[in-house]
Image (spheres, coloured by chain):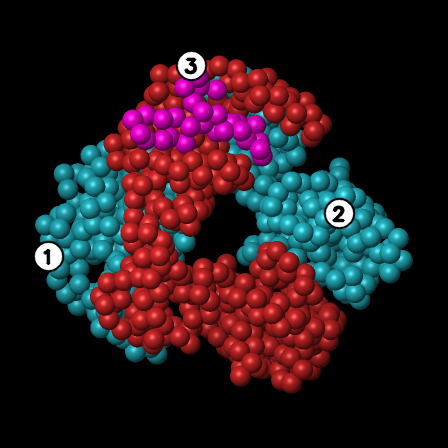
Chain colours: A red, B cyan
Amino acid sequence: MNIEIISIGDELLIGQTINTNAGWMGEQLLNAGMRVQWVSTVGDEYDHLVDALKLAESRADFVLMTGGLGPTHDDITKKVMCDYFNAKLILDQEVLAMVQERFRKRGIVMVKVNEDQALVPDKAEVIKNQMGTAPGMIFRKEGKSFYVMPGVPFEMKVMMADAIIPDMISRYRGVFSVRKTLATTGIPESTLFETMGDIAKIERFARVAFLPDLAGVKIRLTAAGQDHDHARRNLEEAEKMVRGNIEKFIFADDDIKLEEAIARMLIENKKTLAVAESCTGGLISNQFTNIPGSSSFFIGGVVSYSNNAKMELQGVPQELLSEYGAVSEQVACAMAAGARKRFGTDYAISTTGIAGPSGGSTEKPVGLVCVGYTDAQETVARRYMFFQDRLGNKARFSQAAMNLLRTRLLSRKE
Amino acid sequence: MNIEIISIGDELLIGQTINTNAGWMGEQLLNAGMRVQWVSTVGDEYDHLVDALKLAESRADFVLMTGGLGPTHDDITKKVMCDYFNAKLILDQEVLAMVQERFRKRGIVMVKVNEDQALVPDKAEVIKNQMGTAPGMIFRKEGKSFYVMPGVPFEMKVMMADAIIPDMISRYRGVFSVRKTLATTGIPESTLFETMGDIAKIERFARVAFLPDLAGVKIRLTAAGQDHDHARRNLEEAEKMVRGNIEKFIFADDDIKLEEAIARMLIENKKTLAVAESCTGGLISNQFTNIPGSSSFFIGGVVSYSNNAKMELQGVPQELLSEYGAVSEQVACAMAAGARKRFGTDYAISTTGIAGPSGGSTEKPVGLVCVGYTDAQETVARRYMFFQDRLGNKARFSQAAMNLLRTRLLSRKE
């Protein structure tokens, strides 16, 4: 059975909004054993949306649509669906009551266009919106289902989880598929490919895909089977073959971020961390504190852009700064040691470098970073060169510091 | 003339990679006066890619494709293009030399699959890849152009800027369009819509779209015209009408972030800023330091998750913490004042709150935040409630603190 997503909105076509919804939906569906085949993105144009619907109906069994359900004039999805399914709008008293209650709770005056949110097509099953005003809708036609959701991510997500995925599972007939991701770092994609051995052999059991990004290369294995167990056995066979030659580059056996892998290690060993950042400007702290429950291991961080701040807040001696410069292994070590002392943690890491686009020199070019690590026994630093733009460099610097921490934690365990 | 983007890769369908390329390309093309009509996303499947090509050829004049050019077996785009255009692969000596040079410079051994990157279809114009190993390609057919690029964002971006957009501009014939975005904050979408007046009147001059996100609502105006001047005049007329009633909610008249608007104000007035963060965990520092040149106004920040860190590093008196609790206006004020003193800045802002999912209580629920602001004359705090998930709350908290700063800076100016 085939699945298509139709993402609606001019803002997606002109890049004012990045289409994160489609990816999120694809991931959730795969976790439920179902694969998306197509994503079609169209603007707020009546004819284009109708054409996309026709195409989707011709090739997919499930069509998931997001966007264009808002209260303003450029939201045309409900009108298109009414015309496409020859339906009329009727007032849904339950939805109206929910919308009114919502405005009452927030203490905001409800304007006329919000009432229109309670108008629903008479041929649709209505999905209540727990997080906003626009209800979702399900249309059925010749065994095919069309799900219509708002484009606002957190409204869509609740509808997907509560109503749509359960509905799809109950109707889905097809091959079951399972997947696993092995997250690697410190090895380029092409080397990984050659090191891994005979892909054709591995692919007898599972499809292999390589996903490189600023944080490393992820290897995704997808196996199919007649039932869950069969698919799972194929996946395990493929994983064993993949791991053979590249074990040491794998930092996690699921699709998680490096900071999440580190968080697991710290929580498991009841250890704490502090961060001293210069060039990464708070990124590392932000990444760690994005993890729910991070307060159990992440104690705090300091972001120092000026030399004064490095001396005052991170305990870096002025002599080091003048002798070696702010971007040096020595200062990276002093920053890490200073942060560990200040925050009283087991470990601390640090970054000092030049993210660009300006501020570089021949000796210390844009992309240069020194990252530091310290614990009760040792303080070490590493120097790296990267070649990205400002945000890319910040991301690489952060990864380098985290990976230094990860490898030191591993060597502690041995 | 119509433009279609085809994004290729299983990882996009299952959400392992978010399709940021399509949005970026749409934005760049619009800046060059051209609008994307469709984005089709397909997996690494031969037949699906061929179907997408056929559909695109039937409706678009320009087809931009990204992805599937890597060195591994799951990259099928080059093969599909060869078959579709009946072309043969030939070795391009120039590309081979570039690939070899690239590996030599990085000091990495070049493996066999990398050599294959220098095989190009004999019917394609080759676009050199300045940032990676896979060359881009242009195919022509009956006045239509097909551009093929790698999916790696920074490789694609350089090709777009250097080769593809110039090529498209030289071939593009059609209506010229211009756009402008007015960024608002502190007013919900529906209220904005009703306050703005007669949309139909405004739309005689420009299309109006509302783009709500965690940072506020952006209003995008898109005007068309026979030439650039005509389009520009229509846009100006529409902007004047829009601004009439909602002027005070607009923080920028281009598509920038709140931190960028604040950065402009600080740089213009040669003022400096420090940040004391608890619940936002480095996010605000990270947002400010994402801005190139931020070192001219952003001095530093402290991230304190524990009460000890708040006392030690942010100068928050223990009495305040025990009397009012960490999440209180009093502690927010003390954190801001402490950071301003520590870093010696003109202004400082602070956040203390509960991002969730755990850590809330009846009195201080998840979503509660206090944000603080201080300068030489005053120290103030505000209390807000938000209803997002952890990352959403962090984003809203950050916006609330920044907006407090923005409104205080504006009142200073008056």
Q: Neighbour class for label 1 at 10 Å: few (<14), some, many (≥20)?
A: some
Query: Which x, y percent locates residue B173?
Result: 26, 33
Magenta part of the chain: A120-147
Q: Amino acid at mark 2?
A: Ser
Q: Neighbour class for label 2 at 10 Å: few (<14), some, many (≥20)?
A: few
Residue beneath label 3, please?
A88
The label shown at residue B361 is: 2
Quarter of the image containing the N terminus of chain B? top left
Position of B91 compared to B289: left or right? left
The label shown at residue B88 is: 1
> Residue at point 23% right, 53% down?
B77
Measured Cα–Cα span from mark 1 to mark 2: 68 Å
Measured Cα–Cα span from mark 2 to mark 3: 46 Å
Q: Amino acid at mark 1?
A: Lys
Position of B28 compared to A271: left or right? left
Say which chain tag 1 marks.
B
Quarter of the figure with residue B368: top right
Q: Is residue B192 above or below residue B252?
A: above
> Residue at point 32% right, 57% down?
A230
